[in-house]
Amino acid sequence: MDRALIIGASGGIGQAICTALTAQHGVAVNGLSRREDGLDVTDETSIARCLAAIDGPFDLILVATGILEGAGHPPEKALKEVSAAQMADQFAVNAIGPLLVLKHALRLMPRDRRSVIAVLSARVGSIGDNRLGGWYSYRMAKAALNQGLHTAAIELGRTHKRAICVALHPGTVRTPFTADYAARHKTVAPEESATNLLRVIDGLTPKDSGGFFDWAGKPVPW
């Protein structure tokens, strides 16, 4: 891997991945974020502007954006807490935004060699693995993201034969993003999460395109 593009580079996981790629793997990294570059995944104009300003190709494009709380509300524990505003906010950031990034990042992917485009999803977006309920908006948005990535992988395979498009579950990572919700879950540092995710990415083949994998490289049920 020679070049990587990280969307959401100022977040806990995104920043750790940028550091690991640069310091440990000698990869030239382009990092983009809302804080530093004005790339807002809910605003297609900003996505198009930021991606038009850089040249590819990139061996890895990773989208590390996301929210747990929609419209300023914590994840719902019951149907009575569901609101249209919260659901729309979750879908805008966690499902629609990454697909808009893929739309404008497609031109940055090489056609003549292996490349990976990966988006951070979440195990709670798995329908088959849902045993606890709750978290309606977040679960639904991540499930929609997974479907979008699976569909994009099919299209990508027609033009980029060696490309790999996947959803990745990073586990519960100790960042401000999860601080209020990680009490009952085993957590890992962002640096460890970055190492795990890059190991999974390195091991992917074109046959894995369209899949959903966890931090250890194990398939997650849809």
Image (spheres, helix red, strand yellow):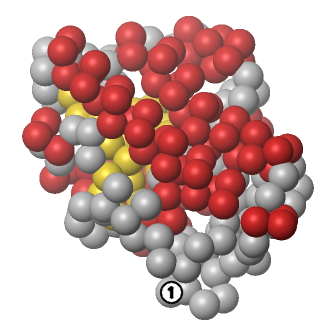
- Does residue 189 appear anywhere in the picture? no
| Residue identifier under label 1 | 186
| Residue lying at 19% horizontally and 22% vertically, measured from the top left | 157
**x and y percentages locating residue 88 in the rendered image:** 76, 40
* Mark 1 neighbour class, 10 Å CA radius: few under 14, some 14 to 19, many 20 or more: few
| Residue lying at 46% horizontally and 24% vertically, measured from the top left | 102
Q: Is residue 57 above or below residue 143?
A: above
| Residue lying at 61% horizontally and 32% vertically, measured from the top left | 97
| Residue lying at 88% horizontally and 55% vertically, measured from the top left | 72
* Residue 188 or residue 97, whichever sits in front: 97
* Residue 7 or residue 91, whichever sits in front: 91
**x and y percentages locating residue 66 in the rendered image:** 63, 49
- Does residue 140 appear anywhere in the picture? yes
**Image quarter (top left, top right, bottom left or bottom right) of the C terminus:** bottom left
Q: Quadrant of residue 118?
A: top left
Helix, strand or loop at mark 1: loop
Q: Farthest residue in the right direction?
A: 72
